[in-house]
Image (cartoon, rainbow, N blue to C red):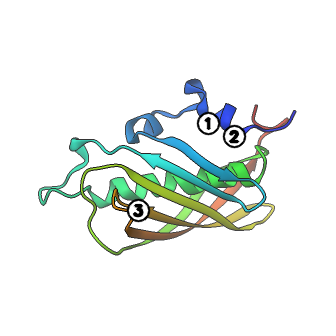
């Protein structure tokens, strides 16, 4: 069976609770380029006392982008567990639609290396991240 990212990620039963909390939505992907684009809708509860989206929530969004990028790159044959994630916060993020992009820079047998970018509602780059993740096979692939 061929892995269909739209069917898999568009199915509510496949969405982990954290993805629902963050307002996760698949926007675009390219399996050949190991790339994915996700939309998020942060909630007012995500704001820090300064009125910006709390950094940990932004990291969660990036983590929930680069992990699915590996699923797309592996064509549904692998799941990931994050080993580490390093982020550079370039500017604060106000409440509003957020877009992230994730790319697998190297897909090994047991470890994947990824890069992520987070853009605010005005399209400005706000956070950059790199990550490594342990790859686990999915017997028979993700359906």
Q: CA distance from mark 2 to mark 1?
A: 6 Å
Query: Which mark is in front, 1 or 3?
Result: 3
* Helix, strand or loop for disc 1: helix
Q: Is residue 84 left or right of residue 121?
A: right
From the image, tell me which residue sits under label 2. 5
Q: Is residue 130 left or right of residue 74?
A: left
From the image, tell me which residue sits under label 3. 119
Residue nearer the viewer, 127 or 139: 127
Q: Is residue 13 left or right of residue 44?
A: right
Query: How far across and how far down the image is residue 96, in percent?
Result: 29, 50
Residues at discs 2 and 1 in contact (Cβ within 8 Å): yes
| Residue 29 against residue 92 in the figure, above or below | above
Q: Residue at x 41, y 62 (%)?
A: 119
| Residue 17 against residue 63 in the figure, above or below | above
Q: CA distance from mark 2 to mark 3?
A: 22 Å
Within-10-Å neighbours for mark 3: few <14, some 14–19, many 20+: some
Q: CA distance from mark 1 to mark 3?
A: 21 Å
Within-10-Å neighbours for mark 2: few <14, some 14–19, many 20+: many
| Residue 94 against residue 68 in the figure, above or below | below
Q: Residue at x 50, y 40 (%)?
A: 25
Occupied quadrant, residue 102: bottom right
Q: Earlier in the sequence, mark 1 or mark 3?
A: 1
Query: How far across and how far down the image is residue 77, in percent?
Result: 79, 45
* Helix, strand or loop for disc 3: strand
Query: How far across and how far down the image is residue 47, in percent?
Result: 21, 51
From the image, tell me which residue sits under label 1. 9
């Amino acid at each position: 069976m061929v892995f269909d990212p739209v069917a898999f990620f568009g199915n509510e039963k496949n969405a982990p609770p954290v993805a629902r909390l963050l307002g996760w939505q698949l926007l675009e992907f390219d399996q050949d380029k190991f790339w994915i684009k996700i939309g998020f809708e942060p909630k007012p509860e995500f704001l820090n006392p300064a009125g910006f989206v709390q950094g940990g929530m932004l990291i969660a969004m990036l983590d929930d982008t680069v992990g699915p990028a590996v699923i797309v790159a592996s064509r549904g044959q692998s799941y990931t567990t994050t080993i580490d994630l390093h982020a550079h916060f370039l500017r604060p993020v106000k409440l509003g639609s957020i877009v992230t992009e994730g790319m697998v820079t190297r897909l090994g047998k047991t470890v994947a290396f990824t890069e992520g970018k987070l853009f605010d509602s005005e399209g400005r780059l706000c956070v950059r991240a790199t990550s490594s993740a342990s790859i686990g096979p999915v017997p028979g692939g993700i359906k």
